[in-house]
C-alpha cells in the first residue's frame, strides 16, 4: 500500500498540471484604449467611422458563447455551450439598456443544456433554441418556459450542433451535421455509398420542419442533402435558402474550398464524394478517386467558393435600414484560425437575395504591419519600415488583442453589429464612433 506522502505528492503534481493546463486554456485579454459606445474600445479593424467596444467577457461568466439575439431593446439572449462536454451549456441574458457605459449584466436563464448553439426568434414571437439533440422554444419571459418541439435528434459524432433559421412561410430549417469528417468508418474505409446519407433520417443534411397554425409539428423531413456541416444557414424573404459549408478537413492549407450553397428542396451537394477547388469547380474528394463522379447532373455546384479552412459559423442578412456598413448585405462569420479566417465578411445582395460583387472585409479587414528584418549574425532583429505584409486586423498582437474567434453575430434595432467570440469568451459591439 502506498504511503500518504507519496499519494499527497502525486495529488499536488496533478493539481499543478491542472493549474498549468487551466492557465494555458485561459484566453488572452484585450487591452482597451479609449471608449466605443460607452464601452472599452478594442483594437479590431472596423469600417471607417465605426469602432469596436468590449461589452462582456470571461469576468462576466462567459464560457463558450456561440449565438446572441436581441430579444428586446437592451436585452440579448446568448447560447453558451460551456465546452464540448454534454450538459455544460446555458442560456444567458445580457442587459445593456439604461446605463450606457456600464458593464454588461449577465444572468443565467437556463443551465444543464446539451451543447446549445442555434438561437432564433420564431414568427410566433417565441425564442427557439437548438441543443445537440433537441429544439425547444420559450416566450421571452422569466423564468424560461421550455416547450419541446423536436426531440431525439442525433447528438453523436463529429458535428452534433444544431443551427436553426426560419423561412418566410414560417418553416424551420435545422442543421443535421455529418457524424464523420469524410464518411470514414472505424477502419478508415470509405464505402462507395455513404451510409450516413441513407435511410429515412439521413445526416449531412438540412431538414425542414413545418408547423401548424397553433405551433404544433406538422412535418419534419430532409430538405437538402450532401452537406457536411451547415452551421451557417440563412433563409431570406425572397425564398432563397443559403448554406455555408464547412468542408472536409485536408492537411492542405489551401484545399478544399469552403462553400456557399443555394439550397433547394431535394438538392444534393456532394458530400462526401465531391469537394470544391479554389476556382469553384466540383472535384472528387480524397479517398473517392476513381469511384465518384462530380458532374452538375449529379450534385448541385456551389454558388461561391471561399478560402479553405475559414470555418464559416454563421450567415445573416441585416435589413436595408437603418443605414450601416452591413445593411442589405449577406454577412458571413469566418471563425478559422488560418490567415484568411477570423473576420466577418460581406457581399451586396441583389433583389433576388443573391450575393453580388466583391467581398468586403467588415471586421478584421487586412492591415499592413512591419515585418522583422532578418537578424544580423549575433545581433537583434529590427523592424524594417518598408517591409510590410497584409494581415487580418484581428490577428493576435501581444499586449493589444488576441486572435479573433468570432462565432456568431446579430444586428440590433439601432443597426449596430454585435459579435460573440467563443474561445475569447467575449461580447463585442461595433458602433458609430460618435
Image (cartoon, rainbow, N blue to C red):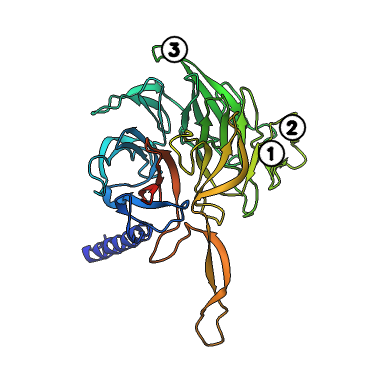
Residue 16 visible within the image: yes
Q: Give the residue displayed 45% in from the left and 48% down from the top.
A: 406
Nearest to the observer: residue 340 or residue 277 = 340
Q: Quarter-wise, where is residue 187 in the image?
A: top right
Q: Residue at x 53, y 88 (%)?
A: 378
* Residue 113: x %, y % from top left: 34, 35
Q: Which mark is residue 347?
A: none
Mark 1 Cα within 10 Å, few/some/many (few <14, many 20+)?
many
Task: Please state the horizontal and vertical placement of residue 204, each as a whole percent of the image.
Answer: 57, 32
Nearer to me, 385 or 278: 385
Q: Quadrant of the N terminus?
A: bottom left
Residue labelled with disc 1 = 274
| CB within 8 Å, label 1 to label 2 | no
Point out the residue furthest to the top here.
Answer: 213
Name the front one of labels 1 and 2: 2
Element assignment for label 2: loop
- The first of marks 2 and 3 along the sequence is 3
In primary-sequence order, the first of circles 3 and 1 is 3
Label 1, secondary structure: give it.
strand
Say whether residue 162 is left or right of residue 414: right
Classify residue 74 by image quadrant: top left
Residue 296 is marked as: 2
Q: Which residue is mark 3?
A: 212
Which residue does the image show at 41% across and 14% down from the upper left?
Answer: 216
116 and 287: which one is in front? 116
Q: Are marks 2 and 3 in contact (CB under 8 Å)?
A: no
Amino acid at each position: 500500500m502506498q504511503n500518504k506522502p507519496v499519494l499527497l505528492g502525486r495529488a499536488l503534481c496533478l493539481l499543478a498540471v491542472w493549474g498549468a493546463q487551466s492557465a494555458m486554456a485561459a484566453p488572452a485579454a484585450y487591452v482597451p484604449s479609449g471608449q466605443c459606445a460607452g464601452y472599452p474600445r478594442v483594437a479590431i479593424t472596423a469600417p471607417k467611422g465605426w469602432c469596436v467596444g468590449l461589452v462582456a467577457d470571461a469576468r462576466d461568466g462567459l464560457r463558450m458563447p456561440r449565438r446572441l439575439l436581441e430579444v428586446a431593446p437592451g436585452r440579448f439572449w446568448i447560447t453558451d455551450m460551456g465546452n464540448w462536454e454534454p450538459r455544460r451549456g446555458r442560456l444567458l441574458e445580457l442587459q445593456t439598456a439604461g446605463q450606457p457605459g456600464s458593464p454588461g449584466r449577465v444572468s443565467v436563464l437556463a443551465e444543464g443544456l446539451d451543447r446549445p448553439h442555434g438561437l432564433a426568434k420564431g414568427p410566433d414571437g417565441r425564442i427557439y433554441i437548438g441543443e445537440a439533440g433537441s429544439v425547444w422554444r420559450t416566450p421571452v419571459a422569466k423564468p424560461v418556459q421550455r416547450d419541446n418541439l423536436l426531440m431525439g435528434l442525433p447528438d453523436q459524432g463529429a458535428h452534433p450542433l444544431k443551427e436553426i433559421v426560419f423561412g418566410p412561410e414560417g418553416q424551420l430549417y435545422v442543421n443535421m451535421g455529418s457524424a464523420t469528417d469524410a464518411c470514414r468508418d472505424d477502419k478508415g474505409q470509405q464505402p462507395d455509398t455513404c451510409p450516413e446519407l441513407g435511410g429515412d433520417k439521413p445526416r449531412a443534411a438540412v431538414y425542414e420542419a413545418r408547423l401548424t397554425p397553433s405551433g404544433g409539428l406538422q412535418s419534419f423531413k430532409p430538405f437538402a442533402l450532401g452537406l457536411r456541416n451547415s452551421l451557417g444557414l440563412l433563409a431570406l424573404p425572397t425564398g432563397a435558402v443559403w448554406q455555408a459549408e464547412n468542408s472536409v478537413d485536408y492537411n492542405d492549407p489551401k484545399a478544399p474550398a469552403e462553400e456557399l450553397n443555394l439550397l433547394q428542396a431535394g438538392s444534393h451537394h456532394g458530400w462526401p464524394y465531391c469537394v470544391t477547388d479554389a476556382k469553384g469547380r466540383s472535384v472528387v474528394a480524397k479517398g473517392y478517386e476513381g469511384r465518384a463522379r462530380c458532374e452538375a447532373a449529379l450534385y448541385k455546384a456551389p454558388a461561391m467558393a471561399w478560402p479553405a479552412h475559414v470555418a464559416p459559423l454563421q450567415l445573416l442578412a441585416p435589413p436595408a435600414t437603418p443605414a450601416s456598413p452591413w445593411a442589405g448585405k449577406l454577412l458571413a462569420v469566418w471563425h478559422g484560425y488560418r490567415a484568411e479566417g477570423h473576420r466577418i465578411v460581406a457581399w451586396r445582395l441583389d433583389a433576388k437575395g443573391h450575393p453580388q460583387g466583391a467581398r468586403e472585409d467588415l471586421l478584421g479587414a487586412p492591415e499592413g504591419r512591419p515585418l522583422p528584418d532578418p537578424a544580423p549574425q549575433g545581433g537583434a532583429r529590427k523592424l524594417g519600415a518598408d517591409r510590410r505584409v497584409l494581415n487580418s486586423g484581428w490577428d493576435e498582437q501581444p499586449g493589444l488583442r488576441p486572435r479573433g474567434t468570432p462565432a456568431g453575430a446579430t444586428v440590433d434595432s439601432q443597426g449596430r453589429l454585435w459579435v460573440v467570440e467563443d474561445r475569447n469568451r467575449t461580447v463585442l459591439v461595433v458602433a458609430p464612433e460618435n
